[in-house]
């Protein structure tokens, strides 16, 4: 985001709209807030600040097409530079180091100060790093930014054996890319299966087999004790908690992300596992919202406080904040959904599995199926493996709260799409 030029000044905002909105963080959520505000007719001053010196970009391809050289930096951009000028969005490159809620200002590391009527914190999360001896060796990576991905892409060109620590989505996507690039890959995971917090045992087993068939070694129930290096300070081996060693010239720590809450906490905003917001994404200060990966928000249906890391969540939050600031406040109650691409397989999740007691599997093909997860007779989430039609139907079914009995779902011939279209109480749900 090298452009520092101030865009043409925006018009006077409509009555009731804030005179100026400053957004800290120009990732998926920050960018979307600016775009949605303009779409909703917001005409006040709009400032979008990011510490990364890049035009706003999307992160999902960083662990997929970009790593394999199938997408370049330009294809990651959410919009070209001309968009921001046309929309009078001031893009500012710089790190916000202080927030003063009383004065309603943010201060950048270089001393610049921006005043706001409303502030949106869209600061995202940073990759968790390994906390073991040797973690600082060359060849040890995390994956969050284009810079991280460029370094990994370069390393993949010469690496012989990659060790991935953590079998979460980012670790597994990287593992798939590394195998496709012809590298030896071992994935080390402390739990007994991959994606343990995100998917059912059934889907996890499918993912395990997929990676094993593609030649990846997966070691479960194993942690990393230390990383060892050569004389040049480059990683050469990974020592596991059982005392065994793996050769490695590339290590990716795929062990999760930590929400960036420092600014909010230092300014006295409530922080607990994320920046605490209410159902309208307002923080404990009525002039400050928080969205996306950094925000801990209440799930309207369950009352549970959640922090999600997904494109859907960042975009949904951004749209809800833009609607509120332009006079259409509503509680945020969108259905979470997510996708991951690994080799030729796409895993899609609709809803949230926070524990289930009944599972129904749709599909005879072992490589294309959906797992319907029920709790106390209520459908909570649907995991689809190479069944995009099921995923779309599940999103609508869950989003609209269409009831589904597990026994009905298990009956021969049942389909999610058919269930959506079935007349109930006289009214069919249109399939669109
Ligand atoms: C490699 C990778 C693959 C992914 N794949 C998928 C996927 O397949 N599907 C999916 O749904 N989701 C995926 N995600 C998650 C998704 O990209 C994130 O949930 C989403 O980007 C969150 O948006 P955000 O705006 O909250 O945060 P971010 O996109 O992280 O943006 C936050 C921005 O804030 C800036 N910032 C932070 N602090 C400051 C400060 N003090 N001053 C100035 N700027 C600051 C940062 O530089 C950053 O650019 C992936 C993430 C990664 C890293």
Image (cartoon, rainbow, N blue to C red):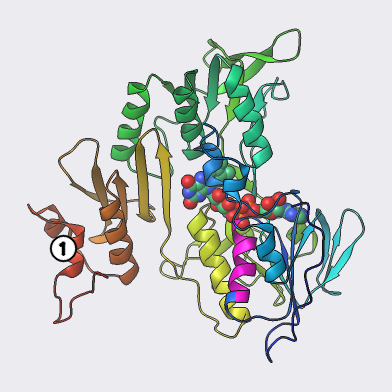
* Residue 259 pos. (x, y %): 64, 51
Name the residue rendered at 30%, 51% in the picture: 388
Our reading of the magenta stretch's main secondary structure is helix
Tell whether 160 sits left or right of 282. Answer: left
Residue range of the region highlighted in magenta in the rendering = 28-38
Q: Quadrant of the C terminus?
A: bottom left
Q: Is residue 264 above or below residue 309?
A: below
In magenta segment, residue 33? yes
* Residue 65 pos. (x, y %): 50, 38
Visible in this render: residue 179?
Answer: yes
Instruction: Tell how many labels.
Output: 1
Q: Is residue 152 above or below residue 315?
A: above
Visible in this render: residue 278?
Answer: no
* Residue 38 pos. (x, y %): 62, 75
Tell whether 6 sits left or right of 24. Answer: right
**Mark 1 sits on what residue?**
418
Q: Determine the residue located farthest toward the bottom in the rendered image.
A: 15
Q: Is residue 114 above or below residue 248?
A: below
Q: Quadrant of residue 325?
A: bottom right
In magenta segment, residue 272? no
Name the residue rendered at 73%, 24% in the picture: 136
Q: Determine the residue located farthest toward the right in the rendered image.
A: 111
């Amino acid at each position: 985001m090298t452009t520092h030029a101030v865009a043409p000044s925006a018009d006077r905002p409509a009555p009731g709209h804030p005179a100026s909105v400053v957004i800290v963080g120009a990732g998926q959520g920050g960018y979307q807030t600016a775009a949605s505000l303009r779409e909703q007719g917001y005409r006040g001053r709009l400032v979008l600040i990011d510490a990364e010196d890049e035009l706003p970009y999307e992160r999902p391809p960083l662990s997929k097409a970009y790593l394999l050289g199938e997408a370049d930096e330009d294809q990651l951009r959410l919009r070209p530079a001309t968009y921001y000028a046309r929309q009078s969005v001031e893009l500012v490159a710089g790190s916000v180091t202080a927030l003063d809620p009383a004065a309603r200002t943010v201060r950048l590391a270089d001393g610049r100060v921006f005043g706001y009527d409303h502030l949106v914190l869209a600061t995202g999360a940073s990759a968790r790093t390994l906390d073991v001896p040797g973690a600082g060796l060359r060849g040890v990576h995390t994956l969050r930014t284009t810079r991280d991905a460029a370094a990994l892409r370069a390393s993949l060109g010469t690496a012989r054996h990659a060790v991935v620590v953590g079998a979460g989505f980012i670790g597994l996507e990287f593992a798939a890319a590394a195998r496709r690039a012809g590298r030896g890959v071992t994935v080390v995971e402390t739990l007994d299966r991959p994606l343990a917090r995100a998917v059912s045992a059934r889907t996890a087993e499918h993912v395990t087999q997929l990676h094993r068939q593609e030649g990846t070694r997966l070691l479960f129930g194993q942690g990393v004790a230390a990383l060892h290096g050569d004389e040049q300070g480059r990683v050469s081996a990974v020592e596991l908690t059982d005392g065994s060693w793996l050769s490695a010239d590339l290590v990716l720590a795929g062990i999760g992300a930590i929400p960036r809450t420092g600014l909010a906490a230092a300014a006295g905003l409530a922080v607990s596992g994320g920046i605490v917001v209410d159902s309208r994404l307002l923080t404990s200060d009525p002039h400050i919202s928080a969205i996306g990966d950094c925000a801990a928000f209440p799930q309207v249906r369950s009352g549970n406080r959640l922090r999600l890391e997904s494109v859907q969540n960042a975009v949904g939050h951004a749209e809800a904040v833009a609607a509120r600031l332009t006079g259409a406040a509503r509680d945020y109650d969108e259905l979470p959904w997510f996708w991951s691409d690994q080799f030729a397989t796409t895993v899609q999740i609709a809803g949230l599995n926070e524990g289930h007691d009944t599972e129904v599997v749709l599909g005879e093909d072992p490589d294309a199926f959906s797992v319907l997860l029920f709790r106390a007779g209520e459908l909570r989430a649907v995991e689809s493996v190479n069944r995009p039609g099921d995923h779309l139907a599940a999103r609508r079914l869950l989003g609209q709260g269409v009831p589904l009995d597990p026994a009905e779902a298990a009956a021969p011939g049942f389909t999610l799409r058919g269930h959506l279209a079935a007349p109930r109480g006289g009214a069919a749900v249109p399939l669109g």
